[in-house]
Image (spheres, grey):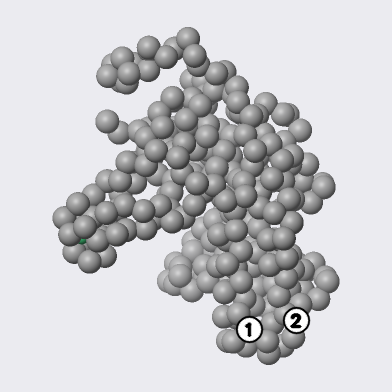
C-alpha cells in the first residue's frame, strides 16, 4: 500500500473526480426503454465502493453494484448495460479511481507452455465502436428451418439471471454437465426475436434444443461474430519470453481489476 501511495501522490493535484466516456456501443444496441445514453459519466470510487467488493455475492452482481454507485446519471440502470459496455466502464472506473494504467494479464504460451504476465497499458488498448452498418449483422435466416432471427446483446442483468438459474439448476441436478447446460443457456441470451416474435426464455431453450445441427452451428457462428463488433480489442499481442512465439489475448476481468498486484 505505501509503495502505491508514493507512486500516486505526485499527481494528486491533477486528479479528476469525474470523467465522461463514450460507450463502445455508442448507445446503438439499446432499446429506447433501456434509457442508456451514448456516453456515461463516472466518479471516482470511495471506501464505500471498495467495501462492496467484499460482499458475499456473485462477481457480476458486485460489478453491477459498484458501477451503479459510480454512474453519475441516476436514470441509468447499470444492470441494463450490455456486457461489453459494462466491462469497458469497469476498466475506465479502475483507471479513474486507482490512477493505475497497468493491468496484468496472465498468458500461457501455446508453443512451449510457459506462463508469464503481460503488463497491458489500459489507455492504449484499441476500442472497437459500434456503427449503424455493423448492426446489419444483427439478423440471420437459418439455412435449414428458414427461421429469421433478430439478435440482441446480453446485459449485465441477463448474465446475473443466467448464473442464478444455472446455480439453481446445478443444485437440483448436481450430476448435470455444466458445459452441456451452458451450451444453450448462453446462446439464448443473444436471441431477441424469432420470425418477428419475442419468445419466452423457457420456449427459447426448447426451440434451441430442437434445432437442426446445421442451424445450431449457423447460429453459433453469428453469435461469435457479433460478439467482437464492439468493445475492447480482443487481439492484444505479446511475445512469449522463452520461445518468442506471438500470443494474442483479450482483457479478462480478474482480481487485478480493483486490486492490482505489485
Ligand atoms: Zn513459448
Residue 248 seen from this side:
yes
Q: Is residue 104 above or below residue 53?
A: below
Q: Is residue 99 above or below residue 197?
A: above
On the image, the x and y values in percent for residue 208 come to 64, 77
In the picture, measured across the screen, residue 75 lies left or right of residue 169, that is right
Q: Which is nearer the eye, 188 or 168? A: 188
Res 126 label: none
Quadrant in which ligand 1 is drawn: bottom left
**Image-quadrant location for residue 44:** top right
Q: Is residue 177 above or below residue 153?
A: below
Identity of the residue drawn at 68% across and 61% down: 134
Q: Earlier in the sequence, mark 1 or mark 2?
A: 2
Q: Quadrant of the C terminus?
A: top left
Q: Is residue 155 above or below residue 222?
A: above
Instruction: Return the residue at label 2.
Output: 147
Q: Quadrant of the N terminus?
A: top left
Mark 2 lies on a secondary structure that is loop
Number of numbered discs:
2
Identity of the residue drawn at 77% across and 74% down: 194
Mark 1 → mark 2, Cα distance in angstroms:
9 Å
In the picture, measured across the screen, residue 4 lies left or right of residue 240, that is right
Label 1 with label 2: CB-CB less than 8 Å: yes
On the image, the x and y values in percent for residue 38 come to 71, 40
Q: Which is nearer the eye, 226 or 46? A: 226
In the picture, measured across the screen, residue 192 lies left or right of residue 7, that is right
Identity of the residue drawn at 64% across and 56% down: 154
Instruction: Return the residue at label 1.
Output: 215
Residue 156 seen from this side:
no
Mark 1 lies on a secondary structure that is helix
On the image, the x and y values in percent for residue 7 come to 32, 18
Residue behind label 2 places its C-beta within 8 angstroms of ligand 1: no
Amino acid at each position: 500500500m505505501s509503495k502505491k501511495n508514493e507512486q500516486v501522490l505526485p499527481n494528486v493535484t491533477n486528479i479528476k473526480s469525474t470523467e465522461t466516456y463514450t460507450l463502445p456501443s455508442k448507445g446503438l444496441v439499446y432499446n429506447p426503454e433501456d434509457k442508456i445514453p451514448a456516453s456515461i459519466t463516472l466518479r471516482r470510487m470511495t471506501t464505500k465502493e471498495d467495501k462492496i467488493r467484499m460482499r458475499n455475492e456473485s462477481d457480476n452482481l458486485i460489478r453491477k453494484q459498484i458501477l451503479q454507485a459510480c454512474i453519475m446519471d441516476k436514470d441509468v440502470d447499470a444492470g441494463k448495460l450490455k456486457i461489453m459496455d459494462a466491462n469497458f466502464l469497469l476498466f475506465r472506473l479502475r483507471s479513474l479511481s486507482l490512477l493505475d494504467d497497468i493491468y496484468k494479464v496472465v498468458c500461457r504460451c501455446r508453443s512451449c507452455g510457459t506462463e508469464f504476465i503481460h503488463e497491458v497499458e489500459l489507455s492504449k488498448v484499441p476500442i472497437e465502436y459500434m456503427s449503424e452498418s455493423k448492426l446489419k449483422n444483427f439478423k440471420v435466416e437459418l439455412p435449414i428451418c428458414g427461421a429469421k432471427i433478430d439478435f440482441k446483446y446480453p446485459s449485465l442483468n441477463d448474465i446475473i439471471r443466467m448464473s442464478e438459474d444455472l446455480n439453481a439448476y446445478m443444485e437440483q441436478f448436481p450430476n448435470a454437465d455444466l458445459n452441456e447446460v451452458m451450451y444453450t443457456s448462453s446462446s439464448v441470451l443473444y436471441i431477441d426475436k424469432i420470425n418477428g416474435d419475442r419468445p419466452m426464455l423457457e420456449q427459447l431453450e426448447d426451440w434451441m434444443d430442437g434445432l437442426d445441427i446445421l442451424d445450431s452451428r449457423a447460429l453459433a457462428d453469428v453469435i461469435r461474430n457479433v460478439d467482437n463488433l464492439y468493445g475492447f480489442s480482443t487481439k492484444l499481442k505479446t511475445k512469449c519470453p522463452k520461445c518468442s512465439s506471438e500470443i494474442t489475448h483479450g482483457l479478462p476481468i480478474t482480481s487485478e481489476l480493483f486490486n492490482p498486484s505489485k
